């Protein structure tokens, strides 16, 4: 079996598995909060952007100087968060992400590193999506990023595509769609990140909070279906869709250190076991 045929078989098998373990959802009705971009066969990269702009009846804006992941952090204001309390530098990063460059370091726990390498080889690097770095040298030359806005018919930002590639090779690491979204029954908007895949996506809803020093914490804790956390959504050929909550939990801490340098500590757990730590140093361009 060729590598291409093996890859296709793995992709079909994965989608079949998620349909079996997931629940049927109505993405145009009660579960509209899970409606997010997908893509067609082949590498993901930036391929989903044009189709998503057409789907929402809008357009792409790749020429926004200093474009941010969110148009304004105040779109997250709610019962547990006030953008006015944020450190101005942290706020600037999210509202003007394209004006920042990053260096990144990755450290896997010994127990999870072989599994992370396997997933990256079989899926991440092949489909150019969620290709988590598994070795320190993978990101030794840093990561490049590009921000593209998806705007509606009135020119208002509906979401932002954040494309991150390895500086040394140009290979995609992440290709995500960022917006603010209110979960059912919640009075606190979440940061919504969708990673498009063929006929589906991985989505994360992150709960924002401001610390006493003005730093930002985004977390996806454990909980029930419909709450902040990580989800896999698969679409079928007949228009049906299936979703399941997965036991992956994340925490981002975005802060200025004692020298005034903006940094991010990112932790990823599988169930209650810490699997991966990522550290970002962020510098204005």
Image: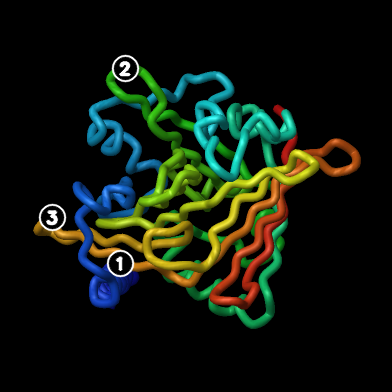
Q: Are marks 3 and 1 in contact (CB under 8 Å)?
A: no
Question: Is label 1 in a helix, a strand or a loop?
Answer: helix
Give the residue at the far right of this rendering: 259
Placement of 62 over or under 263, stated as above or below: above
Residues under labels 2 and 3: Cα distance? Answer: 29 Å
Residue 217 in the image, given as x and y percentages of width and height: 66, 49
> x, y (%) of residue 172?
50, 50
> What is the distance, in whole Å, between disc 1 and disc 2 at their CAs?
42 Å
Q: Quadrant of the N terminus?
A: bottom left
Mark in the foreground, 3 or 1: 3
Mark 1 or mark 2, earlier in chain: 1
Q: Nearer the viewer, residue 121 or 52?
A: 52
Residue that label 2 marks: 154
Q: How many marks?
A: 3
In the foreground, 137 or 71: 71
Q: Is residue 2 visible?
A: no
**Residue at coordinates 41% horizontally, 55% vertically from top-left?**
203
Label for residue 137? none
Q: Earlier in the sequence, mark 3 or mark 1?
A: 1
Residue holding disc 1: 4
Is 233 situated above or below 9?
Answer: above
Query: Dividing the picture into quarters, in which one does residue 279 lie?
Result: bottom right
* Crowding at mark 2 (Cα within 10 Å: few <14, some 14-19, many 20+): few
């Amino acid at each position: 079996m060729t590598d291409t045929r093996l890859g296709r078989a793995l992709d079909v098998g994965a989608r079949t598995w998620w349909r079996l373990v997931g629940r049927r959802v109505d993405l145009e009705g009660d579960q509209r909060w899970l409606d997010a971009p997908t893509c067609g066969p082949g590498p993901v990269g930036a391929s989903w952007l044009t189709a998503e702009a057409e789907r929402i009846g809008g357009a792409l804006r790749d020429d926004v100087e200093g474009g941010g992941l969110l148009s304004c952090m105040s779109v997250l204001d709610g019962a547990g968060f006030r953008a006015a309390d944020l450190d101005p530098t942290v706020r600037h990063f999210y509202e003007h992400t394209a004006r920042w460059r990053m260096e990144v370091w990755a450290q896997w726990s010994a127990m999870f590193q072989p599994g992370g390498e396997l997933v990256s080889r079989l899926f991440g690097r092949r489909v150019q999506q969620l290709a988590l770095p598994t070795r320190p040298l993978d990101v030794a030359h840093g990561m490049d990023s590009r921000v593209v806005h998806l705007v509606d018919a009135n020119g208002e930002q509906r979401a932002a595509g954040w494309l991150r590639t390895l500086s040394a090779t140009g290979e995609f690491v992440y290709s995500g769609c960022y917006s603010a979204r209110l979960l059912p029954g919640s009075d606190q908007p979440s940061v919504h990140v969708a990673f498009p895949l063929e006929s589906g996506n991985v989505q994360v809803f992150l709960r924002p909070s401001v610390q006493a020093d003005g730093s930002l914490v985004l977390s996806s804790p454990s909980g029930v279906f419909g709450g902040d956390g990580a989800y896999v959504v698969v679409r079928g050929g007949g228009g049906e869709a299936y979703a399941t909550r997965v036991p992956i939990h994340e925490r981002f801490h975005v802060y200025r250190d004692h020298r005034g340098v903006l940094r991010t500590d990112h932790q990823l757990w599988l169930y209650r076991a810490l699997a991966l730590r990522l550290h970002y140093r962020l510098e204005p361009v």
